[in-house]
Amino acid sequence: MLSKRHTRTALATAVVAAVVFISARALGHPDSEPAIRAAQGDGSPRALSLAQAIKLALDKQPQIAIAQSQMASSKSRLTEASASYYPQLSPLYQYTNQRSSYHIGGQLATQSSDRSETSIGLRQLVYDTGKRELNVGAARSSLRASEFGLRNTRQTVILNVTTAYYEVLRRRDLLRVQEATVERAKTTLDATRAFAEEGTVRRIDILQAEADYGNANVQLGIARNSVRLAEIGLRNAIGVEPFQSVTAAEGAPEWPKVEADTRTPEAYIQDALKNRPDLMRDLAYLEADRASARIARINAGLQVEADFTAGYRFDPDRGDNRLFTTTLSYPLFDGGSTRARVRSADEAARQTERQIELARQEIHLAVEEAYLTREEARQRIVAARAAAQAARANYDAASEGYKEGAQTVVDVITARTQLVTAETNLVQTLYDFHIADARLSRAVGANDPYWSGGKQH
């Protein structure tokens, strides 16, 4: 038979081997090849790559459908405003039946007549004090604003999907860390029970190992639920139906370079001020508001309008008529409504100007925050890797010491807790970097690779 020392050595060796295997599972995944699963017929979620998730969101997300509808409405308003440049041609058919009655000498007399007329008329607005041009300009600016609004919505959806996608991967990797923790705790518990049967550890050691194993299982349940919640968030970000289950494909993003970004935040800010579609949208709205204010001022002053009309009657008597009309008008008194509309239009333009100033400040803030967060995460990578390696070595040493009787189960549990913290920090650092990088790309206005030359792809 094996001695107690040999038995304990064998058990401890098994613990160390399990640690090595579990650590490889917990931290080896970032360098593994991603595997994209196809949609499963067994009810499991449809696994998507990040690019697939983004493309699906651009097709399914209701926010984008709303923005597209707004742009279509703006196009219609531009067509309506531009129609005043063209003559209005209207055919007309009119039928009149008239009947009248009256008394003559005590007798009731009636008279009736029927008349029908067929004609066609043309009307052309010649001049209206420049309001037509301003209306068309305002409609054109509103259309540009809606186009920039669509681009802005797309970029927001892409950021939401990217963030949700990385969150699924983050929660999944944290789940792997916790699964490894449970396996380590189970290995420690089994070894402690075997040592107790040999009489080499106290009963309290078993209780501590059991409590540790139970707590690890509780955290495992929380981690599994976090993955499910993250998948729900991804589904909502994409905009698919609630009964359609999707998830992120297996794999992890690449580890970033540890060298700092050579570009400064100011360089990114300058790019953002040129590219951000929400800022371009507000500038287009400002043009439309200024045009509306000019129209309000025209309506408050002397107005000149010239019209040309022409018509031709086919029946009952053939003939044509032409009419050129010039009208001058001035709102002498209307209870102050005209002046009030001028003030309201001016205030609307000023509000848009303030909104543009606020948007520029928010762009500065968003770019700087994303940049600093990303670079801080980049700096943490080296430290997090070193901490994970040290924690793994410390846990191996604690397990070896436990085998020799030089360490207690508390030492092993403490070392494992430190290892879990280090592995968790390493996972968090990776996804903190990539999410911050996605936010920076959005803050600059350059995260939509499927929009080129004003067209969606």
Image (cartoon, rainbow, N blue to C red):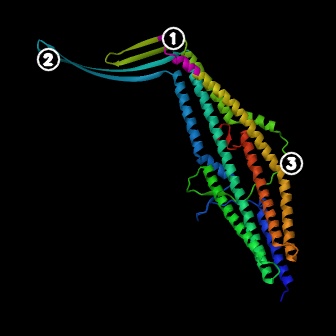
Residue 47 point in image, percent of width and height: 65, 58
Mark before the other along the chain sequence, 2 or 3: 2
177 relative position to 318: left or right: right
267 relative position to 165: left or right: right
Crowding at dot 3, Cα within 10 Å, few <14 / some 14-19 / many 20+, comes out as few
Which one is closest to the eye, mark 1 or mark 2? Answer: 1
Per the image, label 3 sits on a secondary structure element best described as loop
Farthest left residue in view: 106
Alpha-carbon distance for marks 2 and 3? Answer: 108 Å
Magenta stretch bounds: 325-343
379 relative position to 109: left or right: right
Q: Which residue lies at the image location 79% right of the left edge and 80% below the top edge? A: 196
Does residue 215 lie above or below 202 as drawn?
above
Q: What residue type is labelled 1?
A: Tyr
Q: Which residue lies at the image location 17% right of the left edge and 18% below the top edge? A: 110
Per the image, label 1 sits on a secondary structure element best described as loop
Q: In the rendered image, which residue does mark 3 sit on?
A: 259
Mark before the other along the chain sequence, 3 or 1: 3
Q: Do the residues labelled 2 and 3 touch (CB within 8 Å)?
A: no
Q: In the rendered image, which residue does mark 2 sit on?
A: 108
Q: Nearer the viewer, residue 334 or 214?
A: 214
Is 330 contained in the magenta span? yes
Is 200 contained in the magenta span? no
Q: Which amino acid does label 3 sit on?
A: Glu
Alpha-carbon distance for marks 3 and 1? Answer: 70 Å
Crowding at dot 1, Cα within 10 Å, few <14 / some 14-19 / many 20+, comes out as few
Which numbered dot is residue 330? Answer: 1
Q: Which residue lies at the image location 85% right of the left edge and 62% below the top edge? A: 389
